[in-house]
Image (cartoon, coloured by chain):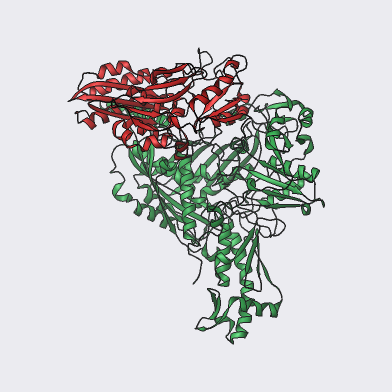
Amino acid sequence: MGVIGRSVTKIDSYTKVTGAAKYADDLTLPRMAYGRILRSTHPHARITRLDVSRARAYPGVLDVITGADLPRLYGIMPTTQDERPFALDRVRHVGEPVAAVCAVDEETAEEALDLIEVDYEPLAAILSIEEALAHPENQLHEETARGNVMKEVHLEFGAMEEGFEAADLVREDSYFFEGTTHAPMEEHACVADCHADGKITLWTSTQTPHYVHREIAKVLDIPRSRLRIIVPPVGGGFGGKCEPFAHDFAACLFALRHGRPIKFTLSREEVFYCHRGRHPVKMILKTGVKSDGSITAVHLQTFLDGGAYASYGLATVYYTGALLTVTYKIPAYKFDGMRLYTNKPACGPKRGHGSTQPRYAFECQLDRIAEQLGLDPAEYRKRIAIEPYTETVNGLRVTSCGLKECVDKVVEASDWDARRGNMPAGRGLGVAISSYVTGAGKAIYWNDMPHSGVIVTIDRGGGVAALCGSSDIGQGSDTMLAQVVAEELGVDPLDIRVYTGDTDLTPVDLGSYSSRVTFMAGNAARDAARKLRALLFEAASVALAVPAERLEAADGWIYDASAAEARIAFAEAAQKAEAAHGTLSAVGSYTPPKLGGKFKGSGVGVSPAYSYTACVAEVAVDLETYDLKVERLWVAHDCGRALNPVLVEGQVEGSAYMGLGEAVFEEQVFRKGLHKIPSLLEYKLPTIYDTPEITAMTVETMDREGPYGAKEAGEGPLNPIIPAIANAVYDAIRARVDSTPITPDKIQRALREAERAGRQVGERQEAIAR
Amino acid sequence: MMRLPKFEYRAARAIEEALEWLGVYAPAVDKDPEARAMLMAGGTDVLPNMKHRIFTPKLVVGLRGVAALRGVSENPNGGLRIGAGVRLSEIAASPVIRERYQALAQAAESVSTPQLRQMGTIGGNLCLDTRCNYYNQSEFWRRAREFCLKKGSEICRVAPNGNGCYAVSSCDTAPVLIAFGATARVAARAGVREVPVASLYDDDGIHPVRLREGEVLTDITLPPLAGEWRSTYAKYRVRGAFDFPIASVAAAARFEGDICAEAHLTLQGVATAPLPLPEAEALLLGQRWTPDLLDAAADIAYREAHPMDNTSGTIALRKRVIRAYTRNALASLARQRGAGAA
């Protein structure tokens, strides 16, 4: 019996539920030192004096690291290297690392932080998109060509003018999506050690060991062969652990200098300052449609509040434009995007990277259009949905697509047709859809090498090991590898030992971002396992005197598919195969096909496959307090094929939960450059009482290129949640809130405005009647 | 991770022992505010505040080993005595409290999360420090912002032109106990005093709890409730758990037939101290509770509540909630009674 499509228990679940799993902060090494980081108290200032001598002299302090020790610039994107581990002469946000104290224990390190003397000369701080545009003279980075414009993008596809001219209805609306942060349960932590041979090992909580490997070696100016990154179990990432951070660099430098291990564990507040979360985005969206609702042209403008550094922002700004086209038939599309530097912690990738904000805007606007045209918003979306195996106007290749099936599922499950429009006052239903990449089609640094590699070995006892550079951040990618290898070799997935995220031992996988691991590492694992299976079948064929084409593998046996009694145990076949071919090990890899157009920026948005999701939300608004309660969420997701249905369901539910928080509660907000609420008490993540029943459904479209037909499930399901809730709020109160989060005060304001507008319409009608 | 500052910890086994240890540091208070002793019951407020360097006591006196602070027992007169060290989870689960002082069980059950209710005590809850978004932050944060009036500065960051500290009273059990007319017993080396819970609180965000240096809150006494009493606690917070109250209403009333014979109404989370509403109480007294009457009482609550912009939520939201929750809380009492109000 196969293991693909079965809800196999996560292979790391036993260690995690018993507390045995060793996260980065659980690691302890002999003679280990501890580090703490001094951070800027100013949003924007020049450092005029930095004196660490008193801290250095403090008993128990082993070293103090400052910007001068690590002056090289780095940045996750090769073309936007604008960051240093520690500020050199200028700080650009509150919480920016200024120095690290390494001491015999954490208390001593913390005490010594107070002895570091820093003089700041405050500079005018840029704290919003508007300020960044209005004050080009107050630059965050003098290297920037134009004021605080970190990146500007202008792309146009198809005949825009004709498109809008042909439209029967053109709508232009503005939306604002507030910034949010990832809030993984595990705060960032790392341990570094260095042996006498000068080789450094860094255990760090990261989603991208390969990229961390590259950047740290570069900044430390050491060959990559002298640095090893190991990813311990990771307590969540959601995009917030896709880059190296100051503590990673400082730990490695300390270990190198002193030949002694050191640990850094950030506090929750520090994680808020590391951020790299969802960009606040202002959006102006203009859409033209025919009277039947078909889209004739779309023009999207986005303004991203990027924070103080580039991070992944170059990709983010492109992503705000790239993925709007993959859900509906759009013949003409124009995109203008701009990311601005501001004196706040850098924004970066968060689940749904850059596509979440414009998807919210688009789905809300389509709801308005459907209403104006008198169309049912769910039916309308199906009518204009993109077809499978087509290409979008901006050159994205769409393969399998279960969008309409997803809409059907949520419509049916929510009893949409019967209930919508028949709800009591203050209650409403809303629908939205979305799509997301199944892995970025291009690496962060462009190259022709595989995006994922897997080694599978078999020992003489039939033991199977799978090695891959991927990083399991809780989503279950290790289990996915075990399932794929187990499927091909016919063994129990729980018997497979999976080793991942070790740059010395495992082949490169680009990391747990852009929902790429199942598709890419899954294909690589299948590639490797199939090579071994061929050798095993060859040996079994000889032993059983059965043609290899008739053999199958399952439950620890290789057997004749047409006469199952002719069989050989897996371990025995492995011994025979090793005797015939030598040590059993195979390498598999996956390289995405060449995709995308020939224009600058065509590398963002391309993906070997796209997932599709639909959501219906049910909400209740208290008409006195304007309190909003999300009562139900129905989510149907086209993941190609659910390799492990329970894990897919978990990803869909987790995405729905995260979307819910962004829709109604969460805001990464600042007062005079200082984060207002950097704690899990005041940054309002939903609790279980705020989380409605979520009905997670799967649509299987069997993608031709995905492993066993699989696509992604980790990010896409988040995107429709927020607009579905926003549209449900409209259905409940007949007034629009066009910014997130949808708070009670915004609902009250929207109702007042709607009332005023209604009164004006009424007065006009009366005047006309008179 | 956030580390605690260095301090001495002594676990008291008896109230006398705690009083003695408190006395060791009490005289030094005026000279050096850091050189003080603090009491700790469950530690759910003290320890986070110490990690934030809001409290930096030299000595922490632990009360968990003091047997005399435990237990819920019936007084001969029909009232109830609750030890200050009784956990909030015990209060919430106590059959006698659930039956007779329902609002107290509701309030205890609404505090934070199950883990913190299992550690936190009713005495600790009553002595909870007032809260403010400018105050309940790490030392780093407060330094980046400049310190506030409650901790280290001459200026309140919430109301720079105001004349005091506006930190918010945030304990859920106090308004309920005040509505019930409960009293608190306070022990000192000089002797024991009994005070109404209402008088434990000062309209001063900096020194919200009126316990003198060296005093220990030991017991809470709930008066006997003769006749047809009903009570409720309606708590508003942004999320369904974890959060402190930002607009709450405690209501207790006695009915004689359709007529209200006694009414107590106290707001919480909108001022530096629990806020009783005598005007609304007078309005409700001796009346049959009609919807119009409850609306009028809710309007008084709305008028009297003056939240500041220093918690989650907004001022406008909290005022709206106070009106709605006051009316709904009263209506639910009337309904429980079958007194005819909607």
- The residue that appears at 26% across and 17% down in the rendered structure is B283
The residue nearer to you, when weighing B235 against A404, is: B235
- The residue that appears at 38% across and 24% down in the rendered structure is B175
Q: Quadrant of residue A570?
A: bottom right
> Would you place residue A530 above or below residue A361 in this image?
below
Q: Quadrant of residue A53?
A: top right
- Quick one: which chain is red? B
Q: Position of residue A760 (x, y in %)?
A: 34, 26
A48 on left or right of B147: right
- The residue that appears at 79% across and 35% down in the rendered structure is A68
Locate the N terminus of chain B by quadrant.
top right
The residue nearer to you, when weighing B167 against A212, is: B167
Please indicate, yes or no, whether residue B189 appears anywhere in the rendered image: yes
Locate the C terminus of chain B by quadrant.
top left
Q: Position of residue A511 (x, y in %)?
A: 63, 53
Q: Position of residue A142 (x, y in %)?
A: 72, 32
> Would you place residue A682 above or below residue A260 in this image?
above
> Would you place residue A638 above or below residue A348 in this image?
below
The residue nearer to you, when weighing B240 against A426, is: B240
The residue nearer to you, when weighing B146 against A436, is: B146
Q: Quadrant of residue B341?
A: top left
Residue furthest toward the bottom?
A545
Please indicate, yes or no, whether residue A166 appears anywhere in the rendered image: no
Chain A is which colour? Answer: green
